[in-house]
Image (tube, grey):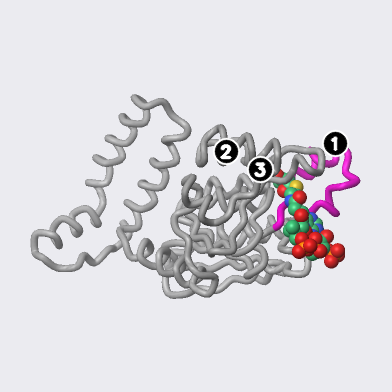
Amino acid sequence: MSYEFVLTETRGRVGLVTLNRPKAMNALNNQLVRELMDALEAFDKDDNIGAMVVTGNEKAFAAGADIKEMSDKSLQQMMDNDLVGGFGRMMKIRKPVIAAVSGYALGGGCEVAMSCDMIVASETAKFAQPEITIGVIPGAGGTQRLTRAVGKAIAMEMILNNRTLSAQEALQFGLVNRVVPVERTLDEALKLADEIASRAPVAVRVAKKMINQAYELGLTDALNQERQEFYDLFATEDQKEGMKAFIEKRKPDWKGK
Ligand code: CAA
């Protein structure tokens, strides 16, 4: 498929999606969001892909929803158009997605990064939810995912008063997995994705689903579901292969079933 605002490529078993609207700081207009989700869904369906990386450029991962596209819209138009509903398609991606963030990850850009499963940040990354400065609030998960990630006190400061987190602060508060030099950011994210893509595919998908359930279910229900998922994996060839390989002291040969 060909896209206007994202670039896609494969690196081994990793699908890479690069947001590519550099003149507008990768502002997330409708089309870009649609293309990003289409690209991720296509990789999700591809048996040759085990994990994905989403990145931007050195200056901006993404500076948020496209303010110029939204500024004149009425309530009805915003609801009909449902830009932020489009972001929700990321929740259905079953394979792991890693964000490689340099520069600005603002508003919807921070929300896209937080919708990924892990974030590798460059030393220059800046995370903020500046919607309050333009008279609105985050609409694609900012009030919810940010609060779960960094806690109420910091989320309040960021969303009510546009506090920007540096990469180091984002690491300290648990928003990102690691901070690396700018020139290493994409490679680190690809390496992490490649390592995960080499693991037992069904178990990786189930593990991702269950970690996300930690935010959806109460503890008893979540533990019951986790136990059942653990048992269900004994119906896969990969469980037999993984345990046999351990006993035989060799590398497992995953079949993805
Ligand atoms: N929407 C539309 N255009 C944007 C944009 C955005 N979110 N962010 C940057 N741009 C455009 C600028 O308008 C500018 O375009 P022109 O050259 O045509 O004027 C171009 O990108 C370069 O930007 P700047 O000249 O502003 O560059 P800078 O280096 O001085 O500043 C910046 C960079 C700090 C990221 C600044 O552009 C900025 O503050 N952007 C807006 C950030 C923001 O408020 N994001 C939240 C959006 S709302 C949202 O995301 C809602 C939601 O939850 C889904």
Mark number displayed over residue 140 = 3
Q: Residues within 10 Å of mark 3 (few under 14, many from 20)?
A: many
Q: In the image, 39: left or right of 48?
A: right
Q: In the image, 135: left or right of 85?
A: right
Q: Report the mark closest to the observer, 1 or 3.
A: 3
Q: CA distance from mark 2 to mark 3?
A: 18 Å
Q: Earlier in the sequence, mark 2 or mark 3?
A: 3
Three-letter amino acid code at the position of disc 1: Gln
Q: Nearer the viewer, residue 185 or 241?
A: 185
Residue drawn 32% across the image and 51% down it:
203
Q: Residues within 10 Å of mark 1 (few under 14, many from 20)?
A: few
Residue drawn 40% across the image and 42% down it:
211
Mark number displayed over residue 205 = none
**Chain part drawn in magenta:** 63-84
Three-letter amino acid code at the position of disc 2: Ile
Q: In the image, 256: left or right of 71?
A: left
Q: Quadrant of residue 220?
A: top left
Q: Which x, y percent locates residue 252?
A: 21, 65
